[in-house]
Image (spheres, rainbow, N blue to C red):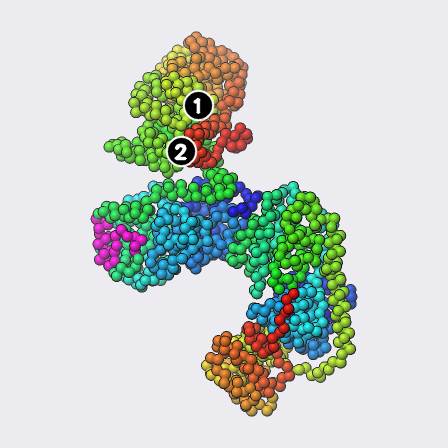
């Protein structure tokens, strides 16, 4: 096609036609996935007939709700031209779940015929047995076997070989999507409630199949009613579900026994797992019930005339006695029935993983929009880039290095972040910490990877289980794997406390770190010294060291004032502060106006506690955001960074200096450590001996002006070199490099490169902070 | 001289055709001492005094036109019929009602007014000796200064923005012919070279809602340009002529299309667009202003030499004066009609002393407006055995309920027209709810056998009606002519081909 508007807006639309009530069931999951995964402008286009059919108004309300949740626009039409008016001037994709050249599908068929050529028209199979795709006998008798589509693409639920009624002229349009209803599982979770012993009986009495090869309506209805009465005698309730479009029982005001509860909610809002079993005449609802895992029986007439070949393999029932027997068996021992059903699902190729259906859908969308228009790829791929963050927990390092720098992009919908924490994997592998089954943990970890379908995976200090399996899965999907570390996690010293020492040095953890250092596509170190350390340790590969580790905005400006408070913030149990206690006691003794505040894990040393209110300790705060908030409230004049220049410490970053500077605090730090560079140019005092500590503190107390100048210089340095924007660009740069690495290794095939839209952007436009 | 144009109904009074053809020349006629008004056909016959010297029937396609022409002519007015769409020269069945109407009209009028020379030819096939005048569709004057400015702006904008709009406007469909949007779709490929890369081009289609069915929309889907479709309004046409660089006017080669006036081309040019026309060379008379080749148009745009540009507006003015200046057209029409008037005054006219008693005989399908006019002006309204309508007629010759034989029924008004010698044959009708008060069997008169033999089953089918229509209607006319005291009868029939079954075939139109 070469007739696209040259000045077409770069925004592409996905428009969904709703004419039959059951269209909602099929299209809704597709709308939701496209809302979550793409930047397409969504529109729900509702026919006048839909509104008239929806006498109760529930389906209109469903669409309203869908529009609210997905940001879709709602519009209506009552003629092909009226529909065209919503389409012209736009381009993209037009979806229908009821489009064939049959009279019953004329509304959408005509819209498809009239649609502007800037739209690619997609028809979705709307039932397990479906006209034009795979018909049952009754459908063929009623509609013939030459059903055709106006669509450009025809999406079916299974392999093309199973589509027995797809006309030869339509075969080239076929795309195997899979059943759209499984997409709901990617979105709706945690709705499952314990089952009750109620059966679900479904009716599709309006259907052509109940009237074509025989008059099955009365037979089915009578059997159903007899069964409900039998159940009533047993004091049991049953649920009855009329077909959403047919509503035969309601429209014909069939009197129902008192034990019948109506289950007329949309299927996607019906928790089928609540039911003990399900029975229906041949209809797609059987597939819903089978996929939900409840024992399911298909009704057939006593003479076996009605065509149930599409459900071959499922249990069949005919007479009331059959119904009762099936219901009893399903309640007593559902497992054998479920096993038969699992085989049926496999044979019918209905066991498509939801993530695969989603991937196919997104591939289709992206491919169609890119037809002859390479720029369209960006339109489709402007969905948020998905970044999977695997970490031992939501630790400060994760906040500092990824969550914070990507926060604004996430809020702008450019990046989608998901944290997979070690504890989640451990929890999935065992109940309450007992009888751990590692295979379950691995399956959980892999399912998370599969569901989220990341564009980038970052293992941040990760030393937990299943790293190898996850990396293998990610690499198989061409997803770049980044390992990030801000410590030499292979040599954690006992100075950090015995517990940490033991935990970090467990062989499983160090071997995971080694594995990631060796097998990640990209290694991102917090400091050049840490990178050198890893090289020294024998990791002979390219590694990247960030220029910035921690960034902060200036929270409290430098202020010319007398020194009132000396502060220390630290989360180690044995901070180097211990060594400084005599110096601090001396200062407090000599300067009665000066106080000392301790914020962190350490308890206040006794030597300082004697100063009463002049020396206080604030307990640690686990939640990182709350911690930062509380830290911002500190009004410290001098901040202490005492560090032993041990091999472990010297590769650490200058985080504490950045933190102190951000709240207007002057820094005194140990020489020969990460602080050497940041404290240059009058941005902090470097000291080594206790005398130097004492002198430094006193000089600042005595010279408020010098302290003020120092803070100002330090804050200038933070603004210029440690800004959040810079860190964001650094992180995005890392992502880019990792992608490039994979691209080079694998050639140009396979990598969803366009998916990761954020790129380093010196203008700041990307982060919205130009 | 008073000229009265008669149209079929109120809604016609504001139609574009009426506005363009008649209202634009009316002020100029006034300066020449003639007045022109446009009215709905019918009630003017109810006056004793003829209110106009000249009456022109414009698209009056039912029996009212025929009857009114007869009445007014009888009172000394000059009657003409305006032919501006060629539904006549094509010999297919959908055109039969039009052809038959024109044939009958030709017997009742004094002149044909035609929109084009081609229509003049068409008219001659029906009445070779009929005086004919060609009234070109007059254009609405244009303001040269404003148009010059607009043309300059459009060209500059197209060159600067590298984009422009092409407009197609007009009726998108026709009940008889494949025209309008079908032409656009058929000739649309010639727009391909406009979108060849030098410019971004959008096509805007303004047309009537009826034409925007799925078949036509599907046709437009294949156009080689991005297309925006809108419902036509006068305002939208003006707005988009103002905005578009080009009007695209493809013309197919059917008789209907080649007889069209230059109206759309004139509107497009005076509205400030270039005209690109493909297909039949209808617009050749607009000569230097019409593009046939899109590539040349693009070249001219690039070089600033578009055919319609500020420098050529004087030439356009002269061309319009020659073709369709309202003042010229008014003068030519006035001269033509005055000559007819003079001839009429020279002729000796015998005027009846009394108003003739007149009736309309309804066939199978008859316009309700015809019956309404009968009641309004006191003509008898008579149903034939074919008449479908359940209305109460003055006289109804037909089957009563399930009866297998034809009877004649009379309303109270109808009874008043029965000649005295037949009154005794009429018996009173009981229980018909006051609709008909008297009835009689078909009397022994010429034609009675035909009517008496008639059974409902004989005319139930179309084939049966075609077979019996001419003889039954002729017999009916004979009988009512004897029973009723009427002097003039007009048939009213809309079902094809019944309206033509009692008439001689017209001459086929020779190929051009």
Q: Residue furthest top?
A: A691
Between B225 and A517, the one nearer to me in the picture: B225
**B4 sits to left or right of A532:** right
Q: Which residues are magenta?
A: A308-332
Q: Residues within 10 Å of mark 2 (few under 14, many from 20)?
A: many
Q: How many marks?
A: 2
Q: In the rendering, at what x and y percent does residue A711 appear?
A: 51, 18
User: Which residue is identified by label 1?
Assistant: A544
Residue at the image point whose x is 56% and y is 84% from the top: B475
Label 2 resides on the chain identified as A
In the image, residue A315 lies in the stretch drawn in magenta: yes
Q: Main secondary structure of the magenta part?
A: helix
Closer to the camera in the image, B305 or A203: B305
Q: Mark 1 — on which chain does it sit?
A: A
State whether residue B500 appears in this view.
Answer: yes
Tell me the quarter of the picture where residue A416 sits: top left
- B166 vs B422, nearest the viewer: B166
Q: Note whether residue A597 is visible.
A: no
Which mark, by number, is residue B316?
Answer: none
Read off the residue under disc 2: A478
């Amino acid at each position: 096609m070469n007739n696209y508007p040259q000045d077409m807006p770069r925004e592409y639309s996905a428009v969904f036609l709703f004419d039959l009530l059951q269209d909602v069931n099929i299209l809704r999951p597709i709308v939701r996935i496209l809302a979550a995964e793409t930047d397409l402008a969504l529109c729900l286009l509702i026919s006048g007939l839909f509104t008239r059919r929806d006498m109760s108004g529930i389906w209109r309300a469903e669409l309203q709700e869908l529009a609210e949740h997905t940001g879709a626009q709602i519009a209506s039409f009552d003629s092909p031209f009226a529909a065209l008016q919503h389409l012209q001037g736009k381009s993209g994709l037009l979806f229908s779940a009821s489009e064939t050249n049959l009279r019953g599908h004329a509304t959408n068929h005509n819209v498809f015929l009239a649609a502007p050529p800037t739209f690619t028209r997609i028809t979705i199979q709307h039932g397990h047995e479906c006209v034009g795709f795979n018909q049952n006998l009754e459908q063929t008798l009623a509609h013939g076997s030459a059903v055709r589509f106006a669509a450009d693409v025809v999406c079916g639920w299974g392999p093309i070989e199973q589509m027995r009624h797809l006309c030869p002229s339509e075969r080239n349009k076929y795309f195997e999507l899979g059943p759209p209803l499984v997409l709901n599982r990617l979105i709706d979770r945690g709705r499952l409630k314990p089952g009750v012993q109620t059966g679900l009986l479904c009716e599709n009495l309006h259907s052509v199949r109940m009237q074509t090869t025989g008059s099955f309506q009365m037979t089915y209805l009578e059997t159903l009613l007899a069964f409900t009465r039998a159940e009533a005698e047993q004091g049991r309730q049953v649920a009855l579900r009329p077909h959403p479009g047919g509503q035969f029982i309601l429209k014909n005001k069939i009197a129902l026994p008192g034990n019948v509860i109506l289950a007329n909610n949309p299927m996607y809002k019906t928790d089928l797992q609540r039911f003990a079993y399900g029975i229906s005449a041949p209809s797609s609802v059987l597939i819903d019930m089978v996929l939900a895992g409840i024992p399911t029986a298909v009704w057939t007439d006593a003479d076996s005339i009605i065509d149930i070949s599409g459900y071959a393999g499922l249990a069949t029932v005919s007479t009331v006695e059959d119904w009762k027997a099936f219901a009893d068996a399903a309640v007593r021992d559902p497992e054998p029935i479920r096993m038969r059903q699992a085989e049926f699902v496999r044979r019918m190729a209905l066991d498509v993983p939801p993530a695969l259906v989603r991937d196919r859908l997104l591939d289709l969308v992206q491919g169609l929009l890119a037809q002859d228009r390479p720029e369209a790829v960006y339109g489709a791929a402007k969905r948020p880039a998905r970044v999977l963050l695997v970490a031992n927990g939501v630790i400060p390092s994760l906040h500092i290095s990824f969550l914070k720098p990507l926060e604004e992009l996430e809020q702008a919908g450019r990046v989608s972040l998901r944290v997979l924490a070690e504890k989640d994997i451990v929890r999935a592998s065992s109940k309450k910490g007992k009888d751990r089954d590692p295979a379950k943990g691995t399956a959980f970890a892999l399912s998370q990877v599969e569901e989220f379908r990341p564009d980038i995976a970052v293992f941040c200090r990760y030393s937990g289980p299943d790293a190898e399996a996850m990396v293998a899965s990610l690499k198989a999907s061409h997803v770049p794997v980044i390992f990030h570390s801000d410590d030499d996690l292979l040599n954690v010293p006992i100075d950090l406390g015995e517990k940490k020492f033991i935990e970090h040095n467990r062989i499983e953890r160090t071997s995971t770190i080694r594995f990631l250092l060796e097998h990640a596509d990209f290694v991102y170190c917090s400091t050049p010294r840490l990178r050198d350390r890893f090289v020294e340790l024998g990791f002979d590969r390219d590694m990247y060291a960030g220029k910035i580790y921690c960034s902060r905005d200036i929270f409290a400006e430098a202020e010319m004032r007398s020194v009132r408070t000396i502060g220390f913030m630290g989360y180690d149990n044995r901070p180097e502060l211990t060594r400084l206690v005599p110096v601090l006691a001396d200062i407090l003794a000599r300067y009665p106006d000066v106080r000392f505040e301790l914020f962190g894990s350490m308890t206040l040393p006794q030597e300082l506690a004697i100063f009463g209110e002049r020396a206080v300790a604030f307990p640690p705060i686990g939640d990182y955001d709350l911690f930062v908030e509380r830290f911002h409230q500190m009004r410290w004049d001098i901040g202490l960074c005492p560090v032993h220049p041990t091999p472990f410490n010297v590769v650490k970053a200058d985080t504490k200096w950045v933190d102190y500077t951000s709240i207007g605090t002057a820094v005194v730090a140990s020489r020969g450590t990460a602080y050497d560079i940041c404290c240059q140019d009058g941005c902090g005092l470097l000291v080594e001996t206790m005398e130097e500590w004492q002198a430094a503190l006193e000089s600042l107390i005595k010279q408020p002006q010098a302290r003020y100048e120092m803070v100002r210089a330090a804050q200038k340095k933070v603004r210029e070199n440690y800004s959040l924007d810079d860190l964001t660009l650094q992180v995005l740069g890392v992502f880019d490099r990792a992608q490039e690495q994979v691209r080079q290794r694998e050639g140009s095939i396979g990598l969803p490169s366009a998916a990761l839209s954020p790129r380093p952007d010196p203008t700041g436009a990307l982060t919205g902070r130009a | 001289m008073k000229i009265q144009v008669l149209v079929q109904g109120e809604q016609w009074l504001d139609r574009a055709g009426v506005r363009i053809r008649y209202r634009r020349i009316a002020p100029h006629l006034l300066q020449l001492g003639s007045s022109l008004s446009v009215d709905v056909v019918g009630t003017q016959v109810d006056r004793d005094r003829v209110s106009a010297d000249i009456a022109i029937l414009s698209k009056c396609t039912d029996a009212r036109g025929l009857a009114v022409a007869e009445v007014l002519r009888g009172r000394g007015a000059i009657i003409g019929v305006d032919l501006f769409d060629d539904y006549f020269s094509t010999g297919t069945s959908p055109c039969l009602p039009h052809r038959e109407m024109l044939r009958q009209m030709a017997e009742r009028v004094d002149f044909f007014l035609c929109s084009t020379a081609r229509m003049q030819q068409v008219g001659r096939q029906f009445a070779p000796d009929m005086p004919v005048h060609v009234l070109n569709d007059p254009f609405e004057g244009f303001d040269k200064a404003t148009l010059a400015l607009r043309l300059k702006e459009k060209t500059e904008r197209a060159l600067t923005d590298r984009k422009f709009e092409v407009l197609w406007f007009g009726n998108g469909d026709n009940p008889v012919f494949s025209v309008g949007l079908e032409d656009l779709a058929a000739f649309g490929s010639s727009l391909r070279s406009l979108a060849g890369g030098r410019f971004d081009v959008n096509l805007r289609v303004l047309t009537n809602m009826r034409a925007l069915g799925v078949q036509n929309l599907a046709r437009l889907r294949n156009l080689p340009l991005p297309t925006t479709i809108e419902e036509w309004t006068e305002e939208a046409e003006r707005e988009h002529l103002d905005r578009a660089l080009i009007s695209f006017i493809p013309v197919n080669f059917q008789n209907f299309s080649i007889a069209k006036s230059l109206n759309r081309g004139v509107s497009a040019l005076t509205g400030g667009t270039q005209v690109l026309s493909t297909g039949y060379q209808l617009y050749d008379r607009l000569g230097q202003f019409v593009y046939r080749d899109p590539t040349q148009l693009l070249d001219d745009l690039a070089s600033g030499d578009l055919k319609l540009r500020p420098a050529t507006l004087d030439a356009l003015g002269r061309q319009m004066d020659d073709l369709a200046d309202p003042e010229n057209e008014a003068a030519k029409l006035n001269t033509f009609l005055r000559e007819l008037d003079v001839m009429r005054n020279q002729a000796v006219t015998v005027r009846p002393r009394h108003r003739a008693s007149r009736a309309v005989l309804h066939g199978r399908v008859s316009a309700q407006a015809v019956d309404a006019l009968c009641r309004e002006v006191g003509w008898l309204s008579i149903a034939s055995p074919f008449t479908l309508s359940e209305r109460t007629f003055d006289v109804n010759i037909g089957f009563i309920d399930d009866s297998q034989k034809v009877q004649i029924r009379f309303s109270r008004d109808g009874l008043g027209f029965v000649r005295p010698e037949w009154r005794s044959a009429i018996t009173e009708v009981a229980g018909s709810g006051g609709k008909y008060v008297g009835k009689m069997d078909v009397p022994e008169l010429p034609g009675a056998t035909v009517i008496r033999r008639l059974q409902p089953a004989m005319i139930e089918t179309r084939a049966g009606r075609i077979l019996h229509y001419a003889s039954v209607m002729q017999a009916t006319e004979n009988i009512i002519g004897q029973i009723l005291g009427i002097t003039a009868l007009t048939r009213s029939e809309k079902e094809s081909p019944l309206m033509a079954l009692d008439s001689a075939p017209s001459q086929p139109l020779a190929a051009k």
